[in-house]
Amino acid sequence: MALNATDCDDRVEQLIILTERLTDLIARQSAAFEARRPHEAAQYVDEVAKLANLYRHESTRVRGNVALVSGASLQRRQRLVRATEAFDSVLARQGRAVTAAKTVTEGLVRAIAQEVAEQRPNASGYGPGSQGAAYRQNGTAITLNQRA
């Protein structure tokens, strides 16, 4: 099936819209992470996931058949290239923001876990009754994951 220029222009225009929308949402998420407000980034998760899946699908489709976009006007193809470059830039920014947020969160978890561990009573002596009373009085339980 041969594609005419109008079909190619329409497909490229739809890819531009998809790429720009995804770029905007990821930029908003990045800004929220950079502002140390990950809860604000959460509001975009569902739409980003949906659009990212669509983007992945369409990108794979175009890579498999370049004729889907090659007949589009040069101006539209250049706009798509610029939109894709902006998307790549925002993805890199988000990667840095998420890594920073993860580092801060892990540090907080470690600090809290250490503080809780320091508040626990020290075991004294050996034998069946040596530490039971101190631990029964303390209702704190802690489980640490080495990755936390």
Image (cartoon, rainbow, N blue to C red):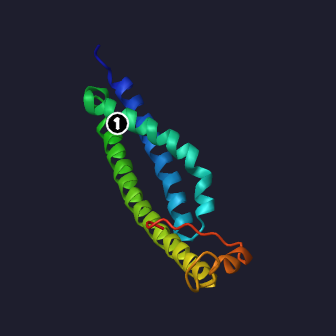
Image point (43%, 44%), residue name: 19
Q: Where is residue 99 drawn, in percent x and y? A: 43, 66
Which residue is identified by label 1?
A: 59
Identify the residue at the far top of this view.
1
Image point (68%, 81%), residue name: 134
**Residue 127, picture quadrant:** bottom right
> Is 94 left, or right, of 46 in this rendering?
left
Q: Closest to the observer: 134 or 96? A: 134
Question: How many numbered circles does the render carry?
Answer: 1
**Height in image: 131 above or below 72?**
below
On the rendered image, what quadrant is the N terminus found in?
Answer: top left
Q: Closest to the observer: 123 or 144? A: 123
**Height in image: 43 above or below 121?**
above
Say if residue 122 shows up in the picture.
Answer: yes
Q: Where is residue 59 drawn, in percent x and y? A: 34, 36
- The crowd level at tag 1 (other Cα within 10 Å; few <14, some 14-19, many 20+) is few
> Is 29 left, or right, of 119 in this rendering?
left
**Residue 63, picture quadrant:** top left
